[in-house]
Image (cartoon, rainbow, N blue to C red):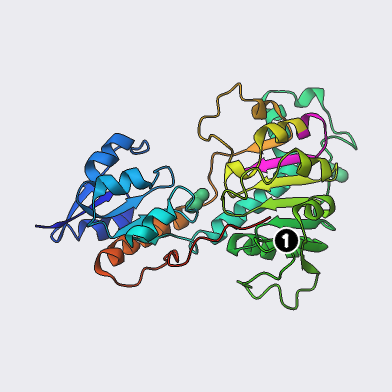
Amino acid sequence: TKRKVVVTRQLIDEAQILLDAKREELEVVQWQSEKPCDRSWLLDNAKDATGILVMLSDKVDEELLEAAGSQLKAIASFSVGTDHVDRDALRKRKIRLGYTPTCLTDAVADLTIMLILMAQRRGGESIAKVMKGEWPQMPWHPLLMTGPQIRGSTVGFLGFGRIAQASLQRLLPFGIKRVIYLTSKPGQLAKEDHFGLIKDCAIPIEPAQSADRLAKESDVVVVGCALTSSTKHLVSTDFFNKMKKLAVIVNIARGPVIDTDALVKALDEEQIFGAGLDVIENEPNIQADHPILKQPRCVLVPHIGSATIETREQMAMESVKNLLAGLTGEPMVNEVELSSVTETPKY
Ligand code: GLV
Ligand code: GLV
């Protein structure tokens, strides 16, 4: 009998072709709709699967692994983030986990710059007013829509991995003045210098001793850390209260790292200047009456960080390659190291 793989989306172009080419050896069961895969469909179809290719909206937990059965060898996630995956459960069962951390770096870093500039230069607020026909009531004025300038900013990164460092690379030509960062080991130098920027940078790049320090000193805060039990609500009222009044915060990581109620309050009370969010708690269930949407200084986009045509093609391709490698025991393009006990970072 053919081994079975389950894929929770239609894929694009080359990736779908690569998958379809395997139908002679594999039974490929694929979710057909544009909407996220139904949980019940996934649980039903996972039975007897050897590999499952999932989106970040599909939870990979004990329930799913149990439904699949002991022949399951690999999960391939179409994402860099893996907070939707129970890593301990995979480790226990010796199931491999593939992900796509490298091919989306440029796309997400680009969006980070967009959100920083939108937040500092009041892009969302400006566009909204013009589209509502309010420009005639707000003729050019020396102080119209003024915001802080990026040149001279101190940028604080919460999480200083690949995407953060690629964002830094883009920020340097804007003339930022200084960089501070916080990793899971506060005060320690970043483990990896992904683009050779940190060593010999023309501006100071320093690890922060604490989130407090980073909040106090940054003009721009970029949230780029993984979501874990210790980063959930890492940014809340205490953090906002320490931020500068003219500072902005951008989140390109996972919504729950920022406490949304605290953010709304900080914006209401003009504790900070603005925010740019690609992700938010409880996405995508953000209705028109959500309090964050009443905040003109917050620009919110619907989790589009990696949404360039090129990147999504590569993510699809890498996910399929990871899935197939997981079945045969070959090296994946990128595999999460599950062998060690998951380290709980302390911030
Ligand atoms: C996007 O958020 C991803 O994890 O790929
Ligand atoms: C702005 O448009 C200026 O001319 O300064």
* Residue at 82%, 27% in the rendered image: 138
Whereabouts is ligand 2, in terms of quadrant?
Answer: top right
> Image quadrant of residue 196?
bottom right
* Residue at 84%, 40% in the rendered image: 146
Q: Nearer the viewer, residue 264 or 85?
A: 85
Q: In which quarter of the image is the C terminus?
A: bottom right
Residue 103 is covered by the magenta coloring: no
Residue 273 is covered by the magenta coloring: yes
Q: Which of 68 and 215 is in front in this view?
A: 68
Q: Position of residue 207 (x, y in %)?
A: 75, 65
Few, some or many C-alpha atoms within 10 Å of disc 1 (few <14, some 14-19, many ≥20)?
A: many
Q: Where is residue 197 in the image (x, y as percent from the top left)?
A: 69, 73
Above or below, comparing residue 116 to residue 71 in the picture? above
For label 1, the SS is strand
Q: Position of residue 104 (x, y in %)?
A: 51, 58
Three-letter amino acid code of the residue under disc 1: Tyr
Side of 313 where 244 appears, left or right: right
Above or below, comparing residue 18 to residue 197 in the picture? above
- Residue annotated with mark 1: 181
Q: Position of residue 74 (x, y in %)?
A: 31, 59
Which range is magenta?
Answer: 266-278
